[in-house]
Image (cartoon, coloured by chain):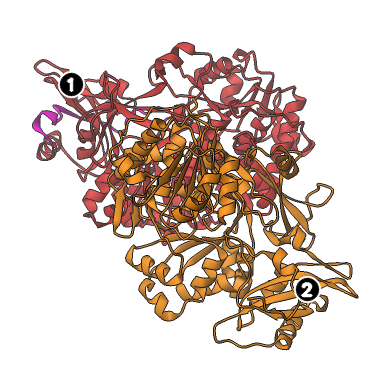
Chain colours: A red, B orange
């Protein structure tokens, strides 16, 4: 006997079992699951009063606030599709995504309402502009709206292959693409993640990862599924993170690489409020260097697990799972394993690191292939973009564009984005490998390596380095350090010191910008 | 993008990731996942040589041996349906089930081959009798057969709603009924169980629960999904259990109530080989008295979780999940909570304890209703028995026949089978409640209470008691003990001492046999 696989079932279960437990905390505000889900229901009934029908798109531009989290329940339970937009994008991107998605309703937090107001007249399909916080002329007042709404919205029937969200990729080169995630995708990714990363009603989850980012790696639903508490955080800085870990009893969080680096490099006085807390943490993104993971584990006593996924894969598909035999390894070796992307989750379907002929590369830790995946966590496709869908999903396999090797133990390690591999004198050089080495230098905070035209080798590595505050290093010193730790042809020909690296709104380094730069010219 | 939800995916994943890890241990024999799954493939190709087609039934009568476990992969991967038969049934039952299922192949271990040989001529639809162990005249030799077979069986396509197993219930009153479990049922139950009961490749699972019993609560696939090791056990006695826990490094097991009672009551010298081992254990079945759970946790330092399910629900649907606030409770109170059936798993769909009008009973810990469930873990129906299916699944809800209350915290507690509720002077009396009290008496090992006609009250409770070895107690003493701990109308009118209780082959007490007995007459 079937019921649709949908994360809405996790909300319904939390309502039955966890009504009195804390669902959400945001500063001074706390909501029980009964209160939180009641607010969702009232927002659902307002949306229906707006005329929202199954399949309609509802867009959000919002930080990690309760009203944003409510969207992940209120919107799909009326059969509509949530479009969570990256709030760090430009106003022009907002316009593009809102129009491309055809959203009828746009919900915005108070930090972004001005930016949207300025381009509002370019969003002709939006019928309702909703201010999630505060009262603003010409905007529907969310709080006032739900305070007077009925909780009895009209139930709709959900098919598990219906779309629950459209998540636009940040698009480093092309226009953002709308990733269509189904109810089934999301449900199975939640269960699969839980099979590897145990959570319980005793857990308190800190929202450092933006909810819009692949639906917060599905934690918008996963935390609810296990009756744990969502603790909101607006401004992601290490001081606030350690503060909340202490104050709000945080047990777990997900961290983008920049957040992990910030945590690892936080000074002792920032760390103090969280002293003695043991936090379990998922991190992802290239390169989450071994040294960073190692520091967080050793100095803070936290437990870091490395995961990998893409918006197109719901997102998590690989997890660097500890094996009993890892425990006996020397610390450095264990850290090197921990920096790998790991093995497929039980829910990931099939992962294959493919060579150009579509064959699996051997498990030799050397042969480079592209990570491909097929199965129930792969998106339905890109919204209104059959060409892009066909380019990404070939012969039933979604192609990630990530170049990786498979180690003899089956653990996958990403070497680079395929387009970021440097070909020098006919040899493939992984920019990620060079970055990993330079990050071990005590003066280096962040580094990004790209290929640069070279008269003799065709291309050669060029390293952009951000030094730690107060630290000093010269180009010659870093090149010497690289030579001591790398094959000579991999040593950067050029090292350029910069104040910061160009990043996308989700924190990914924009190598295509670095590729255009001349050595020695500090852009900022 | 969809792939079918099937536990075969867990086997495929183990093959890719865990080929070199230990899959199965049986005495001196150990098989790696590559070896184990290779054996499955070769058996699959033999089955295809037999002419086995998708949808055909293949029956097994076998203890917990590797060849039996192999059936859970080899049979479904050729699209056929596994029929695991309770080996403790009578030869007449074997004939009934084999014929009713229409099995074309029957696989039998060496302990049951004689019993089957004697009724072989009554199983006219069986084309191949397979001896899983040893070489026997007139039987296909399994080991010889797979040693020479090719591993290249013909792949078949699986629909997730295809049937993977037919599990015949033991049927205390009627003919056994064939519960049809789909690939989707089994897959989701595995993921849901893992979301609450974490396992990892470091785990080593001891097979005390028969594999035939609701597919070993899905652990036939769950252990493989997490790359853990299956450790086989033929004879379930506490001495052997503690021995293997020590020798084979067991970390987890599932125990029927009688096994748990055996573990709790094992003498110190039997326990010695497992000293210092911390085992996590799932137990189910009524009544797993608070006192038994408490003893195992306190004396052995193990972690016991109470679960609930039926063959018809794949099976697990409730789990007594610890909450952070339980930790602060006095030990007795915590033990009382631990003996409850608990809350629905994330994968259970919807659970409702319904009154006669089909409404949910209030969460008051008193109002009695029937546990009903709908969702993805409910069976497809009873094989070739639409009447029984229609009687069990009404208005989309599967009716379990178990009478329960819901506590204010949402935790479900079974009070009785509906047919076992005793009605005395117009009051409902739960036989389970009386059993729970008598089990706290230091002389009592096991107890079962049934209703017995009474001239004044219509019915009154009659307790059948098994005393501990060497312990002494009188009827008057036990009635006094009950009076001190129960409402007076619930005190057993009669107490009969017996050497053992009548049980089904799966260890459930057969109350219908006790109901016919006169007080004071010891039957054995």
Task: Indicate the position of residue B115 as horizontal and vertical percent values.
Answer: 49, 55
Element under label 1?
strand
Relative to B349, say whether A130 is above or below. above
Q: Nearer the viewer, residue B252 or A187?
A: B252
Q: Is residue B180 left or right of residue B394?
A: left
Q: Main secondary structure of the magenta part?
A: loop
Circle 1 Cα neighbour tier, 10 Å, few/some/many (<14 / 14–19 / ≥20): some
Gap in angstroms between the C-alphas marked 2 and 1: 85 Å
Relative to A103, say whether B228 is above or below. below
Figure disc tally: 2
Q: Nearer the viewer, residue A519 or A38?
A: A38
Q: Nearer the viewer, residue B145 or A26?
A: B145
Q: Which mark is residue A423?
A: 1
Q: Residue at x 61, y 39 (%)?
A: B376
Task: Indicate the position of residue B513 as horizontal and vertical percent values.
Answer: 70, 66
Q: Which residue is mark 2?
A: B461
Q: Is residue A519 left or right of residue B40?
A: left
Q: Nearer the viewer, mark 2 or mark 1?
A: 2
Range shown magenta: A486-507
Q: Can you see residue B396? A: yes
* Residue A284, picture quadrant: top left
Q: Nearer the viewer, residue A241 or B215?
A: B215
Which quadrant does the C terminus of chain B fall into?
Answer: bottom right
Q: Are marks 2 and 1 in contact (CB under 8 Å)?
A: no
Q: Can you see residue A210? A: no
Task: Indicate the position of residue B320 as horizontal and vertical percent values.
Answer: 60, 59
Q: Which mark is residue A504?
A: none
Q: Is residue A274 magenta?
A: no
Q: Is residue A492 magenta?
A: yes
Relative to A276, say whether A448 is above or below. above
Element under label 2?
strand
Residue that extends furthest to the right in the rendered view of this protein? B456
């Amino acid at each position: 006997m079937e019921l649709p696989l949908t994360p809405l079932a996790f909300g319904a279960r939390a309502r039955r079992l966890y009504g009195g437990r804390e669902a959400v905390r945001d500063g001074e505000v706390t909501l029980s699951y009964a209160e939180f889900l009641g607010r969702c229901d009232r927002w659902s009934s307002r949306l229906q009063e707006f005329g929202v029908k199954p399949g309609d798109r509802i867009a959000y531009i919002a930080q990690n606030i309760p009203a944003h989290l409510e969207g992940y329940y209120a919107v799909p339970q009326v059969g509509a599709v949530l479009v969570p937009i990256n709030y760090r994008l430009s106003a022009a991107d907002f316009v593009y995504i809102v129009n491309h998605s055809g959203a009828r309703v746009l919900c915005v937090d108070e930090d972004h309402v001005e930016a949207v107001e300025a381009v509002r007249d370019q969003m002709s399909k939006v019928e309702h502009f909703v201010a999630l916080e505060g009262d603003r002329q010409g905007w529907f007042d969310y709080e006032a709206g739900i305070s007077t709404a009925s909780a009895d919205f009209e139930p709709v029937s959900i098919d598990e292959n219906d779309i629950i969200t459209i998540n636009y990729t940040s698009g480093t080169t092309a226009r953002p693409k709308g990733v269509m995630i189904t109810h089934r995708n999301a449900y199975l990714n939640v269960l699969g993640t839980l099979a590897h990363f145990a959570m319980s009603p005793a857990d308190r989850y800190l929202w450092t990862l933006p909810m819009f980012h692949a639906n917060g790696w599905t934690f918008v639903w996963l935390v609810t599924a296990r009756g744990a508490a969502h603790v909101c955080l607006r401004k992601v800085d290490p001081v606030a993170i350690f503060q909340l870990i202490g104050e709000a009893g945080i047990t777990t969080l997900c961290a983008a690489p920049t957040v992990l680096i910030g945590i690892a490099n936080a000074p002792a006085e920032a760390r103090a409020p969280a002293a003695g807390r043991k936090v379990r943490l998922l991190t992802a993104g290239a390169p989450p260097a071994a040294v960073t993971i190692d520091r967080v584990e050793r100095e803070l006593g936290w437990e870091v697990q490395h995961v990998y996924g893409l918006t197109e894969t719901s997102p998590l598909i690989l997890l660097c799972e500890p094996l009993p035999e890892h425990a006996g390894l020397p610390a450095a070796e264990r850290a090197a394993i921990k920096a790998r992307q790991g093995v497929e989750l039980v829910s990931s379907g099939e992962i294959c690191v493919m060579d150009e002929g579509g064959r699996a590369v051997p498990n030799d830790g050397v042969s480079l292939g592209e990570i491909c995946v097929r199965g129930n966590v792969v998106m339905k496709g890109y919204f209104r973009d059959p060409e892009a869908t066909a380019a990404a999903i070939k012969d039933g396999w979604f192609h990630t564009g990530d170049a990786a090797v498979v180690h003899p133990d089956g653990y996958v390690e990403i070497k680079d984005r395929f387009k970021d591999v440097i070909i020098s004198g006919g040899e493939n050089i992984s920019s990620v490998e060079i970055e990993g080495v330079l990050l071990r230098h005590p003066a280096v905070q962040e580094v990004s390596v790209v290929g640069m035209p070279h008269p003799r080798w065709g291309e050669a590595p060029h390293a952009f380095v951000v030094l730690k505050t107060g630290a000093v290093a010269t180009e010659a010193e870093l090149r010497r350090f690289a030579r001591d730790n790398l094959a000579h042809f991999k040593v950067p020909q050029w090292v350029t010191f910069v104040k910061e690296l160009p990043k996308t709104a989700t924190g990914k380094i924009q190598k295509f910008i670095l590729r255009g730069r001349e050595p020695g010219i500090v852009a900022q």
